[in-house]
Image: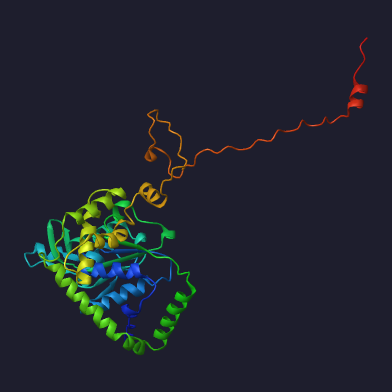
Amino acid sequence: MTTAAPMPVPFPFAAITGQPQLRQALLLAAVDPGLGGVLIEGPRGTAKTTAARALAELLPGAPFVTLPLGASLESLVGTLDLGQALAGHEIKFAPGLLARANGGVLYVDEINLLPDALIDSLLDAAASGVNVVERDGISHRHAARFVLVGTMNPEEGTLRPQLLDRFGLCVQLHNIEDAAQRQAIVRARLAFDTDPQGFRAKHAGAEAALAAALIKARAIVADASALPYGDDVHEAVGALCIASQVDGLRADLVMLRSARALAAWEGAADITPDHVQRVAEAVLLHRRKPQAEGAASAPATPNAQRAPDTSGTGHHNAGDQDWGAMPPEPVGIERVKPLRPLIPSHTAQQATPKKA
């Protein structure tokens, strides 16, 4: 008989430093799990798994469930016993990982390597809070309200745009290049590894404050009459989504819900355009069209060169040209000197036959 090894204690969420966008996105998804989860892009060793596991500890009694890469669709959504149902007995349902993750955090590392069928089921349950299992005309549904956290390394491939759009928020992490910040993070991690319980005790007060604030914000979001907003908020959302050339209206809806979650987290009386601005990047990062991203990063100048107009209409349309095309530039041409003959001139004269 073997004894199960105890699970390692998680790193405190309050002690995570150097990733403010990641912290905000995870907290917003925890305040309103209906946002559709958080997709985290970034290289190895940027605290993706650490932050997801720490978030689960802030939720009261929340499980932390990991979806392995080799998981089947049945292990994710659950299975139905058709024999029991056809015999006239009650439907026998074997729950899957979605049922186990209800009320907690479902973590998927390298989500871009999963089959599309599993990702579809994940995103459906994350957005609706319900998992539906159907087989041969028999169906079963159960609650599946969890915070979906998916990670991926862009060097290993990405998700199809249709799947990217269904993630509520997206955060792109980068390697930390500030020496002082790197040293602070390394010292904190070494202190935790040396004495986990002592390190957690130092941050217990901050952890308790985060957990209490999260419970309060969730209660505010659950109240449909709380946090009103006016036309100025709608106008801010619409302008940002139009400028980013997003497809459909999912970005507008997610941005409004994210702004509402941020206002609830901060204890604001209402939602303002400032809340919209502060959540916009996480909502638009994975939905923004490349043309819109280039226009935002390269402001026009009076002397800026434009690609020649080949439409015959006199209008320049960036959408009709190849993305990244460069205007032609003049190239200097140096006159080439004539080559010297291989045979000396006097030899050539001697070799020329005389006329009769």
Image quarter hosting the N terminus: bottom left
Whether residue 288 is visible: yes
The residue at 25%/83% (across/down) is 208
Whether residue 2 is visible: no
Task: Place residue 198 in its image quadrant.
Answer: bottom left
- How many tags in the picture? 0
> Which residue ends up furthest to the left in the rendered image?
88
Please state the horizontal and vertical placement of residue 101, each as a whole percent of the image: 23, 71
Task: Place residue 341 in its image quadrant.
Answer: top right
> Which residue ends up furthest to the top in the rendered image?
356
Please state the horizontal and vertical placement of residue 267, each as a whole percent of the image: 19, 72
Q: Nearer the viewer, residue 9 or 283?
A: 283
Does residue 15 sit above or below 322 in this rendering? below
Please state the horizontal and vertical placement of residue 65, each as a whole percent of the image: 27, 73
Image quarter hosting the C terminus: top right
Q: Nearer the viewer, residue 255 or 107?
A: 255
Q: Is residue 280 left or right of residue 173?
A: left
> Which residue ends up furthest to the front in the rendered image?
302
**Which colour style is shown?**
rainbow
Q: Nearer the viewer, residue 230 or 223?
A: 230
Please state the horizontal and vertical placement of residue 155, each as a whole percent of the image: 44, 59
Does residue 338 sit above or below 48 in this rendering? above
The residue at 33%/73% (across/down) is 51
Does residue 205 sit above or below 115 in this rendering? below
Task: Place residue 338 in its image quadrant.
Answer: top right
